[in-house]
Image: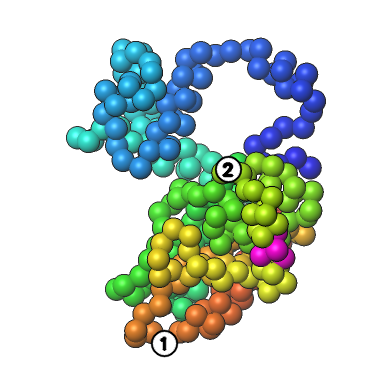
Amino acid sequence: MTGEGRLAGDDSKQAKSTTYRAPALEKGLEILTFLAQQEDPLTLTAIVQQMGKSSGELFRLLQVLQTHGFVAQSREGYVLTPKLLQIGMERPPLRNLVEVALPAMRRLANDTEQSCHLGLISGSEMVVIARMESRQRLGFSVRLGYRQPLHLTGSGMVLYAFQPPAIQAEWEASFSPRLSGSGLADFRRRASEVHAAGHAALPSAFTNGITDLSAPVMRGDRAAAALTIPFVEMRTQSVSMAAAATRLVEAAQAISESLTGSDSRV
């Protein structure tokens, strides 16, 4: 089995697949990829400077992308819209996964008084495809489409931990930034501990005061997604972190069972 986003075949076949060119399409994809990496809107001038292309060429391409809803323009500049994510979510397996998960995620958010989100692998990253807010006044959540390197998140650790060894090896080869030998050994050790425990409870690598509680949503013998609570410790709360982790695992198992039943009816 090949990893997501990679095709089977030898180098000669891959070389042949790149002999056909569509310059306008390639330039449009370059712009989309570039904007996806930006945290803030960028003006046309800034895009021209950073991409090294002519202003006329980029302006025309941006106008076409804006017309089709892939790019939006504000006073501050151009930004990528969620349309690419929405198109990807229309694929039946993903749409089915989200439809099955959302009711369980709503119950989990209500029961734990914490927000939760669903993430899966995209290339070498973990990307959030669904989320559910807590009803509490104070909380923490991530936006749809949020992504981080797979091996730097609790969700990514869970996704990796519950894969067959061959898939784990493929993912390791795509880690970016790359891990050193000792770093990879430590990552594998922690993943083994997560697998044994059935879930992860790791301090967030990006936000102080957040503990990522994450459990696998299984499809067959591997994790199809990771259900995660970015747990916020508050002075007044009725659900402890340990209790939230228990309910998280139960919710992930319920989604897995519903997913299996749904798949069998397809």
Q: Position of residue 8 (x, y in %)?
A: 77, 32
Give the mark nearer the N terminus: 2 vs 1: 2
Q: 228 or 166, which lies in front?
A: 166
Q: Is residue 228 visible?
A: yes
Q: 153 or 266, which lies in front?
A: 153
Q: Which residues are magenta?
A: 188-192
Q: Is residue 173 left or right of residue 251?
A: right
Q: Which mark is residue 238?
A: 1
Amino acid type of the residue tagged 2 in the rendering:
Ser
Q: 106 or 153, which lies in front?
A: 153
Q: Position of residue 65 (x, y in %)?
A: 38, 26
The secondary structure type at the circle numbered 2 is loop
Q: Say which quarter of the image contains residue 246.
A: bottom right
Q: Which mark is residue 249?
A: none
Q: Say which quarter of the image contains residue 122.
A: top right
Q: Say which quarter of the image contains residue 49.
A: top left
Residue 56 lies, with reference to residue 65, above or below; the image says above
Q: Is residue 217 visible?
A: no
Q: Residue furthest left?
A: 75
What's the residue at 22%, 36% (across, down)? Answer: 76
Magenta residue check for 191: yes
Residue 197 lies, with reference to residue 163, above or below; the image says below
Amino acid type of the residue tagged 1 in the rendering:
Ser
**Between marks 2 and 1, how big is the CA–CA gap?**
39 Å
The residue to which callout 2 is attached is: 176
Q: How is the image coloured?
A: rainbow
Q: Is residue 105 left or right of residue 189?
A: left
Q: Is residue 173 left or right of residue 124?
A: right
